[in-house]
Every structure is written in structure tokens, then in C-alpha cells.
Amino acid sequence: MLQITTIRQQPEEIVARLKIKNFDAATHVQSIVALDEQRRELQSRLDETLANANRLAKSIGDLYKAGKADEASRQKEESAALKNTSKTLGEELDATVKKLNDILLLLPNLPNESVPAGKAEADNEIVATGGTLPEKNPTALPHWDLIKKYNIIDFDLGNKVTGAGFPFYRGQGARLQRALINFFLDQGIAAGYLEYQPPLLVNEDSAYGTGQLPDKDGQMYYAPVDKLYLIPTAEVPITNIYRDVLLREEDLPIKNVAYSNCFRREAGSWGAHVRGLNRLHQFDKVEIVQIRTPEESYQALEEMREYVAGLLVELELPYRIVRLCGGDLSFTSALTYDFEVFSSAQERWLEVSSVSNFESFQANRMKLRYKTKEGRTQLAHTLNGSALALPRIVAALLENNQTDDGIRIPKALQAYTGFEMITLG
């Protein structure tokens, strides 16, 4: 959530910067400024009324002690009127604050100054590449054919038991999945991240805290009896560890890594770009989260970017890194780098990670603050990244490493899988 002081002081700047995200904030900002002025006026009147009531209460006591019962009785009537006024003002103030917060929740985060203008994926900027593209193989099979050939992932069984987008992994497919999870976690721990295993459901406050609500309400699975949401990423429970927490500067940086199942009710569509593992409703992901000071957060973002690139190098996957344009940037992000790996059989790039800096946007929603060494209290910056999302990594590994003898496992994973090839059998 954007800070109200920033909106109050720079309304035109807020509107101009959000246009980069193709978001027209003019009406929202105008309403926020008006409601904030109303809120401050009501707060001032309420404070003054309460102060007068307190003075009267003391005066009434003094009058009774002095034997001036008639005058004390008149002031009690004034005190009762002030109590009624304060009750009315308090109700008006609460209603105004709710209206103000409801509109504030609709405003996306401001894009960083380096974010390019643009409307969609085609306008993103390629900032780095790595690895070597595999030679084109006209006989190469897409992963949805490979998984049937080697019987390692079963979509039909998943559809029978649950529904579309919930596959079963079996045999060497399940072991490959587990190997990737353990590899990513071990790499994170070696890089100084503390491992967590989070719950898969969160309450409404947590979903609001990291910005999934109200923006992604329709994409989240919801358990209405318990009023809990299935997580779309481990970012949600991990970042919410620090909701309503006052840290010390000495506590920073905080670096956490977590594996979780992820659940997303994405709108369905047809075509190869969503076929097989390209889009699932349940999938596995290892997430990294950092809490940093504002001065260090963009250095941390670059470090996270290099870390994720290093994972793809270890997996021997050709990749590219793109800086998202304003129109492709998420509601909560100030700057995002997407990582894409090349799928040889599909002959297209598949997104496998996003590394983002949210600056103080999530921290302001969560009241995540830290006390500086000088004693000041200020909002922290939050960052997160996929390190990595498994489905499209698996798709690329299967397609890029298929041979006449089977599917080759990258050397870095062989100690985790216990086998070098996925074979028929």
C-alpha cells in the first residue's frame, strides 16, 4: 500500500508514475486526498472534544469537593453532550478511515524509475542471456508426449481424482521432482537463506498483507467455512511472518527460503502455451524472500537475480532475463526481472522465475518496520523470487535433454535423483 503522506504531498507524481503501469489513478488519488483531509479534520475535532470532556470531568470533581453541586450538575450535562458528540465523531472517523483504506488498497505499487513503458510482454526488455540454445531437432518431442512415453507424469489420473491441472508424478518423474526441490533448498541454505516449511493456507490478513487481496481475489482458492486461502506462493506466509513486527536494523538482512505447494485458479485458455506442465492449478516451487533496508534493497535484488541465474547454469538450461515493462508488472512490484528458459521442442521461452522488489509497498500493508541504529522507526523493503518454479523447469529439462537412450539428467541433479537417465520401463 502506498503511504498516505506521499500521496498527499505528491498527487500529480503518483498519477504520472502509475500511468507507466497503465493504471489511471487520477480519480482514486483525488478521493484519497479529500478523504485524508476529512479524516484529519474529524480527528482534530474528536481530539478537541475529548480534551474538553477530560477537563470537564476534572472540574466536576473539584466542584463537588467545593460543595458547588448545582454548578457541577450543569457541567455534567455539558459532559454528557460532549460524550454524545465524541461518539458521533468517532463513528464518522471510523467510516472515513475505512473508505480511505478501501481506496488505498486499490492503488498498485509505484514502478521504479528504471521500469520501461509498455503495455504487455512484447514490450519487456531483455537484459541478459546465458547458456547455449540447443540445436533444432525436428524429431524432438514436446514434454507432454515425453511424459506419456516414459510414464512419469499422469494428467489423466489427476483429472480423474481431482480435475484438470492437478497431475500425478510417478516413478522417476516423482524422484526428479523431489530432487529439484532438495537441490533448490540446499542451494538456498548454502547461500545464507534460513529454511522454513510454511502452512499452505493463510488467513485474510496475510493475503491482504502481501497484496494478493483484493487484486488476485478471483485467482485464489478459498475455504469459506474457515475463511482461509490456499497460498499461490510461499511468499505469502513467509513474508507475513514479519507482519506487525518491529525489527532492529541489526536484524537485517533477513533471508528465508521455503518450499511449498502452490495453488492458482488461473483463467483457462487453449493452445500449446498452456498445455501439459506449462500451466497448472497446483505446482511446486521454492521461494526466496528477503527483508532489507531501503538503502540496500536494490543491491539485494541484483544479488537475487545473480543467484537465480546461477541455478539455471547448474541445471545447464539456456536462459534469458527480462526487465518487465510497466504494463506487465504486477500490482505489488516496483521492479521485476523474469527468467525464461528455452524449450527446444516447443521452440519458445518459458517463464520459470520472477525476482521482484516491492520496496515499502507490502511493508506498509503489514506494518513491517525496523528501528534504525539512530532510533528512528521506518518501513522495511521486501523482496522475493522463485528459485525456482518446478513445472516449466521440468518441461525444459525433459525436452532439452531427450536422447535416443532416454532423457539425460543434468550432472548437478544426479546425486539427488540417484540416476543419470530417465529410461523406459
Image (cartoon, rainbow, N blue to C red):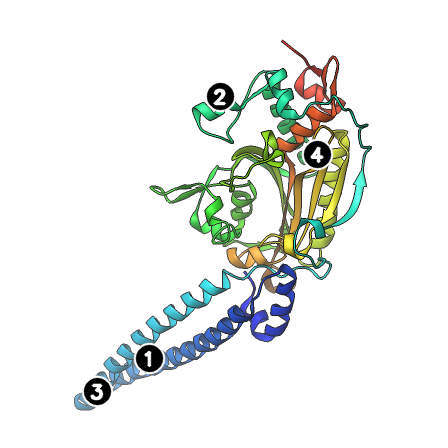
The front one of 354 and 1 is: 354
Going by the numbered disc 4, the residue's amino acid type is Ala
In the rendered image, residue 338, in percent from the top left (x then y), is placed at 69, 45
Frontmost of labels 2 and 4 is 2
Mark 2: few/some/many CA within 10 Å (<14, 14-19, 20+): some
> Where does label 1 land, which residue?
54
How busy is the neighbourhood of tag 4: few (under 14 within 10 Å), some, or many (20 plus)? Answer: few
Q: Which mark is residue 72?
A: 3
In which quadrant of the rendered view does residue 222 lie? top left
Q: Residue at x 67, y 34 (%)?
A: 189
| Residue found farthest to the top | 425
Give the labeled residue for mark 2. 157
**Tag in front: 2 or 3:** 2
Quarter of the image that includes the C terminus: top right
Q: Quadrant of residue 332?
A: bottom right
Dots 4 and 3: beta carbons under 8 Å? no
Residue to which mark 4 is pinned: 190
